């Protein structure tokens, strides 16, 4: 038993004295410039914001259409203009409008700042007139209030449509830039791969195929053009074999 313990102790001491093997991180054989990857991230972020901005502006446009439909009910049913519940419905629809949802990043605020400001002003004006219609007794002509809110709603819808058009155009432009950036990354990776293959084979990519092509070309140059007849070793005339095209012409010529 003691011999076994001593043997194990010796093995432990030998393991401690053995040099530690430190595994080095794997070398990166294919690399892409960090600046190029940064461009990729930027384009992806821009594209995401423009697409989301397009969605938000279209949603705002649809909300404006619902408000217009609600206002047009008063033209068919004028008695509703005296009902506070009718105006509460208009106010609820206006509360669902939020122009700030279109601007998803401060970076893009300058792109649509004028349209967002116009939407905010039109929304505030519409809310003021609806609030006046909700307070008993009503302040102002109900029909005039409806007309004013209608104009404000149309303005919000038009500005939302304008933002949607810009977002779509910018998204398509950014998509083209993103595709170009990705193509550059792929080209860089393929170039690095070809370089590695060239270094490992001891010659440039396609080197062996090039040698074969050069050998075939030199052989053709050495042989020269084929002659119809050539003298043999013993003075005999050796006729060269006709080509496939000549044989076909001979066959067709005999058939005429």
Image: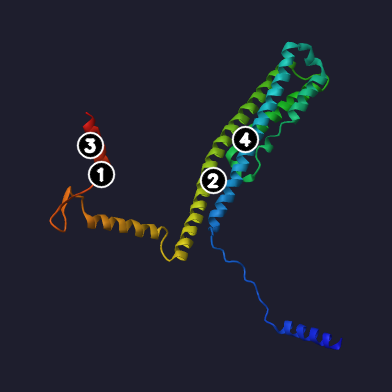
**Picture quadrant of residue 123:** top right
Relative placement, left or right, of 7 versus 255 is right
The residue that mark 1 highlights is 243
Residue at image coords 59%, 44%: 46
Relative image position of residue 59 (x, y in whole percent): 68, 31
Q: Nearer the viewer, residue 237 or 222?
A: 237
Q: Secondary structure at mark 4?
A: helix
Relative image position of residue 153 (x, y in whole percent): 67, 25
Relative image position of residue 91 (x, y in whole percent): 77, 26
Within 10 Å of disc 3 (Cα), the crowding (few <14, some 14-19, many 20+) is few
Q: Nearer the viewer, residue 68 or 208?
A: 208
Asked whether the viewer can see residue 145, the reply is no
Asked whether the viewer can see residue 169, the reply is yes
Residue depth check, mark 1 versus mark 4: number of the one nearer the observer: 1
The CA distance from mark 3 to mark 4 is 73 Å
Q: Secondary structure at mark 3?
A: helix
**Picture quadrant of residue 14:** bottom right
The residue that mark 4 highlights is 54
Within 10 Å of disc 2 (Cα), the crowding (few <14, some 14-19, many 20+) is many
Instruction: Say which label, 4 or 2, has the lower sequence index.
Output: 4
The CA distance from mark 1 to mark 4 is 68 Å
Within 10 Å of disc 4 (Cα), the crowding (few <14, some 14-19, many 20+) is many
Q: Residue 178: which numbered mark, if any?
A: 2
The residue that mark 3 highlights is 250
Q: Secondary structure at mark 1?
A: loop
The CA distance from mark 2 to mark 1 is 55 Å
């Amino acid at each position: 038993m003691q011999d076994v313990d001593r043997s194990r102790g010796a093995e432990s001491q030998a393991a401690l004295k053995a040099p530690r093997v430190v595994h080095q991180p794997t070398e990166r054989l294919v690399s892409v410039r960090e600046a190029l990857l940064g461009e990729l991230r930027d384009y992806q972020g821009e594209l995401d914001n423009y697409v989301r901005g397009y969605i938000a502006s279209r949603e705002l446009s649809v909300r404006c259409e619902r408000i217009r439909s609600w206002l047009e009910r008063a033209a068919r049913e004028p008695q509703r203009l005296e009902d506070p519940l009718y105006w509460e419905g208009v106010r609820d629809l206006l509360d669902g409008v939020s122009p700030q949802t279109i601007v998803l990043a401060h970076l893009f605020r300058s792109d649509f700042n004028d349209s967002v400001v116009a939407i905010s002003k039109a929304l505030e004006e519409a809310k003021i007139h609806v609030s006046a219609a909700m307070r008993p007794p009503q302040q102002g002509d109900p029909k005039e209030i409806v007309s004013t809110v209608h104009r404000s709603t149309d303005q919000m819808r038009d500005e939302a449509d304008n933002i949607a058009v810009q977002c779509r155009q910018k998204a398509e432009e950014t998509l083209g830039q993103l595709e170009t950036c990705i193509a550059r990354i792929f080209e860089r990776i393929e170039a690095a791969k070809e370089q590695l293959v060239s270094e490992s084979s001891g010659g440039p990519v396609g080197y062996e195929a090039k040698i074969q092509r050069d050998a075939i070309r030199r052989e053709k140059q050495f042989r020269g053009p084929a002659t119809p007849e050539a003298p043999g070793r013993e003075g005999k005339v050796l006729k060269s074999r006709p080509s496939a095209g000549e044989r076909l012409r001979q066959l067709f010529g005999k058939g005429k």
